[in-house]
Image: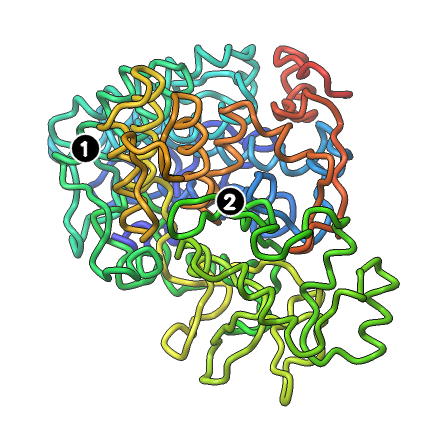
Amino acid sequence: MKKIIQICVVALVFVSSCKKNLLNTVPDNQLSSKTMWTSDASTIEGVNGVYAALRGGTKNGEGDMLYELYSTDRYGYTGQAYFATDLTAGTATPSLSLFSTAWQALYEGIARANDAIKNIPLQSPSTAVKKAQYVAECKFLRAYFYYRLNQVFQGVPIYLEPTEYDKFNKARSTTDEVWTSIITDLTDAINETNLPGKYAAGSGDYGRITKGAAYALRGKVYMYQKNWAAAIADFQQLPSLGFALYTGAGADSYNQLFKLANEQSPEMIFSMQNIDLAGYGSDISFYNGTRAANGSCWSYYNASPYLADLYENVDGSKFNWDTVIPGYSTLTPAQREVYFIRDGATAAELSAAATRGAQVSLYLPAGNEARILRAYASRDPRMNQSLITPYSTFFGPNTVAKYWRWPYRAETAPSFDIRADNTVGFYYYRKFVETGTAETWVRTQTPVDFPIIRYADVLLNWAESTNEVSGVTQSTVDLVNLVRSRAGVALLQITNAALPTYVSSQADLRERIRNERRIEFVNEGINYFDELRWGTWLTNKFKANNGALYPWGKPYVTYVKQGDYITAWPIPNSVVQITGGNVKPSPGWIY
């Protein structure tokens, strides 16, 4: 199915009835909707064109959020970028390309879906079974595009029919009206008897929309509406359809889940289909890997120390720096740099560190590395499966290990230091980054499918919903423990208050579930949207000590909060102008 959707569509993509500017549609020399649906072959090409809209947006800078969802982690609590971004630098405006690219690409997908939903029943000679399946798939995709729009713009115009360019002037619907429309589409998809519940691994149709995907997405929408009971009812459908956590690699299952061999495991419910072909593979390794990774990657995006500190000790107790290094928290972030300096630092290196504020009197010339390494030992295994932590090793496209050391000296012998794009030391990502001699794809076209919804997401959403309905129960804790058990960290329990795994209250379980999501879905483009839904984004992203941080907590780039209004993206300035003001400017933003 990867090849069907992503290669064939290169040759043939239909044009929706809208034209330029607002939706920036495909060139006019491609098939029009009048001829697209008049044969079996062109019908499947048209449907594939709707799927192709999942790859909307650009691949670089502020516009890449739609092409590669992982990049949104830089806006979340768990991730960061080593450069300033407008949304966190206090410089965002309604003219920012991030907003207009998202709007444009998602409405392009909606326009394609509308064309398909309208014309397949009217024009296509395909069998009734196939036509019903295609329409259900396109209704899911339309729902998904509106879901992405509503998550950030929080109320947008709704178009459910092919629309001429000069008619794109509807007023904005409310956030809840958009959720209701999405639920209608997903319900139609679920009720379509010709839509399969799940495709088996290896199926030629694997990657196409299923009832499982529709149930999972509808459950997520119900959560936005705080309709917890309806969300639970949807999530409960997934196990019977055959979805389950991947556990086939034992203790290494979490790590192996994100490898090519397991991209079609029962855990994957809805994923971006990638192949090793320019324009149709993922660039996640390129933007997240260091220069030590295959192809010499750029490390634009990395993990926040706030994420690293969330990983519990393997016994389920919370990590505490003062337990590892007594007095750590009494020092300023700048002073703590001393604990991260490599053994055998030169006088010049120590002098430079002192100039930056490091408390060099605490330096251990022969034991500094061993001291800091204790902070990363006996932690939740997902930490070292997801992150390159200080003084750990990384194997790129050869058998020579590279080492996270500070300060950086050289990536060649005798140091073999890991070098980032800017030589600054951060917590770098391992997850989704190519390793070893077997993973040597072109850095911008990694063929591993990118998960959009997976079963662990369902389990933790299910647990969150049941906790909101019933509070702490054993069955709710059990849902969380399925994820924790696969990871290899101590299980939560409600019987022994003396243990750190004891769940004391509904509020305690709520925060534990949130933290579980923060560490389970690292680099998957989930955290930013979670924090927005929970209402925690402003507090967490703009802490007193905020910014893109070194592991010791000193800002490399400082964040600036513009105002509370930035929790909702502004309607792009161009849309306000094109619609003659029918789509009103967003409150708080200056147009």
Type of amino acid at the residue the image marks with label 2? Leu
> If the image is split into quadrants, where does the C terminus sit?
top right
**In the rendered image, which residue does mark 1 sit on?**
133
Residue 362 position (above or below residue 484): below
- Residue at image position (49%, 24%) is 533
Q: What percent of the width, then of the height, locates residue 470?
A: 29, 16
Q: What percent of the width, then of the height, locates residue 329?
A: 68, 47
- Residue at image position (51%, 60%) is 376
> Closer to us: mark 1 or mark 2?
2
Left/right placement of residue 316 relative to residue 322 reads: left
- Residue at image position (63%, 17%) is 579
**In the rendered image, which residue does mark 2 sit on?**
310
Type of amino acid at the residue the image marks with label 1? Gln
The disc, 1 or 2, on the residue closer to the chain's N-terminal end is 1
Front-most of residues 54 and 257? 257
Q: Quadrant of residue 408?
A: bottom right
Q: Quadrant of residue 347?
A: bottom right
Residue 132 position (above or below residue 252): above
Colouring used for the render:
rainbow
Label 1: how many residues lie within 10 Å, few (<14), some (14-19) or many (20+)? many
Q: Which residue is situated farthest in the front direction here?
A: 498
